[in-house]
Image: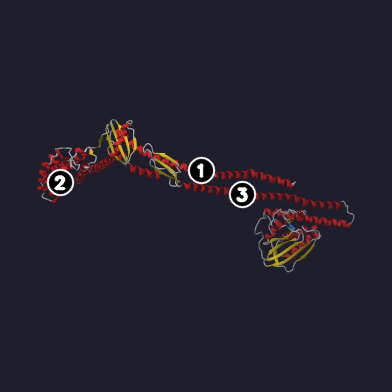
Amino acid sequence: MEDAAHLEGILRFAGLFVVTILLPTSLLAYFGVVSLGTEEASVRADLQRAANITADTYWSAVDREFSRLEERIGARLISGRSPLDLPRELHPHMVAALRFDESGQLEAPFIIETAADGVPAVALFHPLVRQAEEAERAGAPAAGVAEMYARAALEVPWPAARSRLQFDQARMLIKAGEIDQAIDLLNRLIEGIPTQRDPWGFRVVDLARLARGELFLESSNRRRVRRGRNDLRMLVENLLSTRWVVGQGGEAAVVRYALSVLEPESTSVDWIAATRGRADERTSSLFWTGELLAEVGAIVGQAGRNRRTDGDLGWVDGERAIWVSTWWGDDLYVFALDRERVVSELKANARASVLTDSDVAAYLIAPNEPLGSELLVSKPLAPWLTGWSIVVEPRDPADILELRDQRRRQRFIIILLAVGMIGVGTITTTRLMKRELDGARMQADFAASVSHELRSPITHIRVQGESLMFDLMDSDDEREEAYVSIVRESERLSRLVDNVLDFAAIERGAKRYTLRPDNLAETVMRSINSISSAQEVRDKELDVNLPTDLPVVHLDADAISQCVINLVSNAAKYSEPGGWIGVRGRVVESGVEITISDRGIGIAPHDLREIFEPFFRSRDALARRRKGTGIGLTITRYIMRAHGGDVSVQSRPGKGSTFTLRFPLQTTEATPRRSGLR
Ligand code: ADP
């Protein structure tokens, strides 16, 4: 019956365990292990996500940059400010900004001149010209050299070459100190042929204005100085607003020189700086226009063929430039971005657009460049850079496997740990549960055995008492026997009640002992005498051998007596009828020992650890046959510890047991070192 209830409890617990722990754990572990297989896919998905983000970020940055350029060009066109002005304001890598007319002729800011417009260099090989040049080089007197240039000027047939030689004459006159004469000559040149260029690409008129301005600036006459400054400023402004000739550097050089002459004189530093900036940009633009001349024709032709709506930008990836063109009325604007710099910047940005701890790498791929095998994203940079793409790849394809394995390992360890922890938890819980169940069971057993133990002496006393009361005994001997029996049973009853009450007091922590120096042997002897007549002891051979000279020990005589009675009573109880009980005393190194031995049923090794625990009763059939409550040894151990000593046991099943009470020689303690029962 009891076992069935026990089994039911275990089954219920097992069911609960399976449903609440084992099943969910197994499911979790199963899914965890299954998900290990999907790790590679998840690594790839992560990489793909990182790649998409990288490509989108990069594309947006490029879009922002080029859209800004489009906006700026549009704003210039709408506001009326020429888009050719300061091209670098439109884009830092813009190297040329040109305007063409509908027929594809370059209109601004430069002009393409045919060779026929210039002066053949051969003009300067005239013997007289060479003579004058050699004389100048040799350091001949300047007045004489001026004369020689004048004569050469009369001889050469080309008007432009003539004015150039007259300019050289003026130069020599200045050197010779003939300033007025030089100024006269320069004035004549300035009013002469305005656009003719010398074989070096200089317009003589510009050179003359420059030389005259410089002369005025050097003059001591304040009015002349002012005029010189104004002339040079005007010269610079004029030159900056005229169309320079592609392939000719004359204007650029004159502007640069004029600015350097004006700089120490000028009151307006800002004007100088701003003008120098414009001049530099124009010069570089002129250089680039010359460089890109071979390409620009095709761009203009293409823009002419597919004419777009005004203000709409067309992009062409050229050989050396990235071309942007737009129509505005009858004008076609063409802008060139330095391709090398734009591309290298875009490449650097591609690398930089990857987040630092990301496992992807981004590249800018040129048209027709082969792609890697592990491509994650490829996004074309249309419409700006046709054919170019931003490509994102895994940083290292081996990384994917490495990353996958790493994640697998991590996950596996986590699963293992979790399962391990659940396992440990389960074992601990089961143990605790078992202990609690055992405790509960033992407590229930205790209640049952106490009532049982109480009932038998009480019944016995009542029966004997009633027999006496109603005078049912036949003889005096019988009456005597009944009296003795009543006394014995009452003693047994009070021993039992003492034990239970003591146990309760100990449990409450209310039990105190008063230790006094006392004769241990006498106390033990007294106890043996008081128990010797008990039912279970009577039929046993009591072999007591206590030295009379045992040292004095601090003890609570009643408590020690209770210990001895418990142990002797157990020795008798767990022995067969007629068994032997030995009581010995001896002095050992650490104190005094009383041993109580029997040759009874003994104790199984697995029970040895537990017999001192409250309510413990062996489950062995032999032991079970004896009545008991399971608290005797608990009380004994408590009392002994309260005396600063302890109780220990040695036993072999079937051979008998020996319990040893050990007393310290000197003790002042009245409470156990380790309080509590368990
Ligand atoms: P009980 O009232 O059951 O005797 P105890 O606390 O005195 O309670 O003893 C606990 C258990 O120890 C007993 O149930 C018994 O199994 C075992 N035991 C105690 N003394 C002996 C002994 N001398 N020989 C064999 N077993 C013993």
Is residue 283 in view?
yes
Front residue of 325/132: it is: 132
Q: Secondary structure at mark 3?
A: helix
Q: What residue is at 38 percent from the left and 44 percent from the top?
A: 349
x, y percent for residue 58? 40, 41
Q: CA distance from mark 1 to mark 3?
A: 30 Å
Q: Estimate the spatial distance between the alpha carbons at disc 2 and disc 1, rounded to whole Å.
A: 81 Å
Q: Quadrant of the C terminus?
A: bottom right
Q: Nearer the viewer, mark 2 or mark 1?
A: 1
Indicate the secondary structure of the residue bearing disc 1.
helix
Q: Which residue type does callout 3 highlight?
A: Gly
The numbered disc on residue 386 is none
Asked whether residue 611 is in view, the answer is no
Q: What residue does disc 2 label?
A: 218
Q: Earlier in the sequence, mark 1 or mark 3?
A: 1
Relative to residue 47, is residue 318 drawn left or right?
Answer: left
| Residue position marked by numbered label 1 in the rendering | 42
Q: Amino acid at mark 1?
A: Ser
Question: Which three-letter amino acid code belongs to the residue tagged 2?
Answer: Glu
Q: Which residue is mark 3?
A: 423
